[in-house]
Image: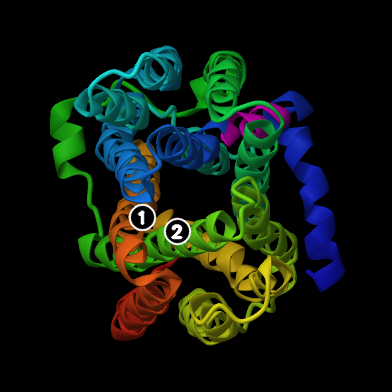
Amino acid sequence: MSRWNALRAYSALPATTGSWFLAVTLIGRIPASMGQLGALLLVSGATGSLALGGATAAVFALGQAAGGPLVGQTADRYGHRPAGLVAALLHTAALVLLVVCVERDAPTWAALAASAVAGFSVPQVGPLSRARWTALAHRGRLPMDRFPTAMSFEGTGDEFAFVLGPALVGIIATATSPPTAVLVAAGLTVTMCVAFALHPTATMVTRGQNREEDAAAPVLRVPVFLLAAGLTGLGCYFGSVQAGITWRAVDAGADGAAGLIYALLGLSSALAGVLVPMLPASFTLARRLRTGFVLLLVLTLPLALAGGLRIGGLWLLALLIVLPGVTIAPILVTAYTQAEMTVPVAKISWVMTVLSSSVVVGYAIGALLSGTLTDRYGPLAAFLIALGAAGVGVAASSLGRRRLAALRPG
């Protein structure tokens, strides 16, 4: 397949699932990307403490990390529809409760608890959507050579949400208030996430496997661990950069600009994700993953210097944050494509949510550490943590290159 034909392969996706599925899976993952930054701005704006706001966002992320694999296991066993519906409704209620706690000046623990439940119940649209593409490929509904294109679409979808979520939070928080931004996330959840749960593709994923079959199904645990470690580093990178950008925006008196600048990271990533199918087959998945993390580390250096040493204004950060963004979607696409090779299709929802939760765990670590340290030492601490997080990805993909290179489709 030529490189341009690889791009044309995107046209096979709506023919497989219908255009409505592509719409709901894209829009349905936006609320999760709004929740963390929305919680941060909501609490920090009401209390004046970036550390407390970072803690609230971190608790949201920890809840999401804990709940993600559970949602995946539930979806594998009972089906995507019941798992998705319960998660969507609980997530909506928790977001509304979080706003009520902050607006009514409830005790800090109440807001933290509501944020944790909101994170725990994130509907996991992205990972479950990947699971559906995998099931479609194994059932012959999607040609296996089109599966990498589907994963590229998913990676671009993640970045689409990554762009729009923070941007919507920033725009809505600036135009109205942070509570309104969180309520908009709740509204999107109860509409689009429910639509995703009810879509006919939900029936394509194997469900109701008995416990003996599940226990006997082979799982390549070392590759799963390596991929999870790398994506944990990537998540820590997100949380750290977000904290550093937020500090700079608040210091400049332009709080709402944080979401807009951070969204540029996702925009450049989304554009790069669309082009991933053009990469030559000789550029193997294991090499792509390692190269992606190395480039992420190198291209973050200018951002860390300008952001941490307070060189230039917010416009310079907006320009420099585009550079590392071009590596993120390719890293995610590659990792999730490799993940499909580590488990049987009966456990695909679980492994996809494990990787997604790894990103969230990393985000929680990055947000909590960076939020606390930037309050004391300024933005340089956050950007140094981001560099270290990229280094974790380099280490995981380098030390495990033989195990990851041995993965094969099917």
The x and y percentages for residue 179 are 53, 24
Start-end of magenta stretch: 23-30
The location of residue 268, given as percent across then percent down, is 71, 64
In primary-sequence order, the first of circles 2 and 1 is 2
Which residue has dot 2 on it?
A: 243
Q: Is mark 1 on a helix, strand or loop?
A: helix
**Residue at the location (44% across, 33% down)?**
124
* Tag 2–tag 1 contact (CB < 8 Å): yes
Corner quadrant of residue 339: bottom left
Q: Where is the C terminus found, in terms of image quarters? A: bottom left
Q: Looking at the image, which is closer to me, 130 or 308?
A: 308
Q: Does 160 appear in magenta?
A: no
Q: Dot 1 corresponds to which residue?
A: 367
Amino acid marked by disc 2:
Ala
Residue in the image at 41% along x and 72% along y: 386
Q: Residue at x 46, y 33 (%)?
A: 42
* Left-right relation of 281 to 347: right
The crowd level at tag 2 (other Cα within 10 Å; few <14, some 14-19, many 20+) is many
Q: In this view, does 311 lie to the left or right of 179?
A: right
Q: In this view, does 334 lie above or below 387?
A: above
Q: Is the magenta stretch mostly helix, strand or loop?
A: helix
